[in-house]
Image (cartoon, rainbow, N blue to C red):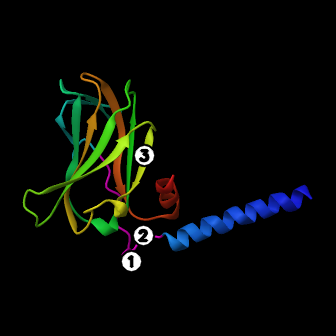
């Protein structure tokens, strides 16, 4: 009796996993996948606040207004090729508010942004195809962190990824 129940639960979980992948796969992704775009000391820079590099991580000290802005890179990527963004921050005393900001090619200086809320979790996966105005060619991408003035926050990952079933499930959570 117990074995049948366990097998039934496992089969149900497998069916749920398969249906999530089938029905919620990102649209517009075909052919060869694009390589991930990750932060590096060569491409990433701190605009607001003070940033230092420690073991490949960025230690971001928020400015006097309690704000920090990290610019990932000047990208020129197709938005539909990167349906997932991963952000990993830690070490904050407060629960900082995180906002993503980007520019699209061909729109002049117009910027777009999407708040992703208070960052209570260390690791945050965002389904970018659900962000309003995340379309076309993305020219630049930044993350804005608002917390307490002088607070030091460790950013260990700020990356864009192509589609995969595991990333899709992480973004659902």
Total residue callouts: 3
| Residue 30 marker | 1
Image location of residue 139, percent across then percent down: 17, 59
* SS state under label 3: strand
- Residue drawn at 36 percent across, 62 percent down: 130
Marks 3 and 2, the one that precedes in the sequence: 2
* SS state under label 2: loop
- Residue drawn at 52 percent across, 58 percent down: 169
Q: CA distance from mark 1 to mark 3?
A: 25 Å
Q: Residues within 10 Å of mark 2 (few under 14, many from 20)?
A: many
Examine the rendered structure and indicate whether residue 56 appears above or below residue 30.
above
Image location of residue 83, percent across then percent down: 37, 63
Q: Residues within 10 Å of mark 1 (few under 14, many from 20)?
A: few
- 34 part of magenta stretch: yes
Image location of residue 165, percent across then percent down: 52, 64
- Residue at the left extreme of this rendering: 108
| Residue 124 marker | 3
Instruction: Please tell me whether mark 1 or mark 3 is closer to you in this view.
Output: 3
| Residue 58 marker | none
Marks 1 and 3, the one that precedes in the sequence: 1
Q: Residues within 10 Å of mark 3 (few under 14, many from 20)?
A: some
* SS state under label 1: loop
Camera-nearest residue between 38 and 60: 60
Camera-nearest residue between 126 and 73: 126
Magenta residues: mostly which secondary structure?
loop
- Residue drawn at 19 percent across, 30 percent down: 49
- Residue at the bottom extreme of this rendering: 31
Residue hosting label 2? 26
Bounds of the magenta span?
25-39
Is 26 positioned to the left or the right of 18 in the image? left
- Residue drawn at 22 percent across, 32 percent down: 67
Camera-nearest residue between 20 and 87: 20
């Amino acid at each position: 009796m117990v074995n049948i129940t366990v097998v039934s639960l496992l089969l149900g979980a497998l069916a749920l996993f398969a249906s999530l992948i089938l029905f919620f796969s990102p649209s517009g992704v075909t052919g060869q996948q694009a390589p991930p775009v990750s932060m590096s000391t060569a491409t990433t820079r701190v605009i607001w606040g003070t940033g230092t590099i420690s073991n490949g991580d960025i230690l971001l000290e928020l400015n006097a207004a309690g704000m920090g802005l990290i610019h990932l890179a000047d990208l020129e990527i197709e938005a539909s090729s990167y349906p997932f963004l991963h952000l990993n921050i830690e070490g904050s005393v407060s629960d900082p508010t995180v906002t993503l900001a980007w520019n699209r090619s061909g729109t002049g200086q117009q910027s777009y942004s999407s708040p992703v809320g208070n960052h209570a979790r260390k690791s945050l996966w965002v389904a970018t195809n659900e962000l309003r105005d995340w379309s076309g060619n993305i020219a630049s991408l930044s993350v804005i962190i608002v917390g307490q003035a002088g607070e030091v926050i460790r950013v260990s990952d700020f990356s864009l990824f192509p589609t995969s079933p595991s990333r899709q499930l992480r973004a659902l959570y």
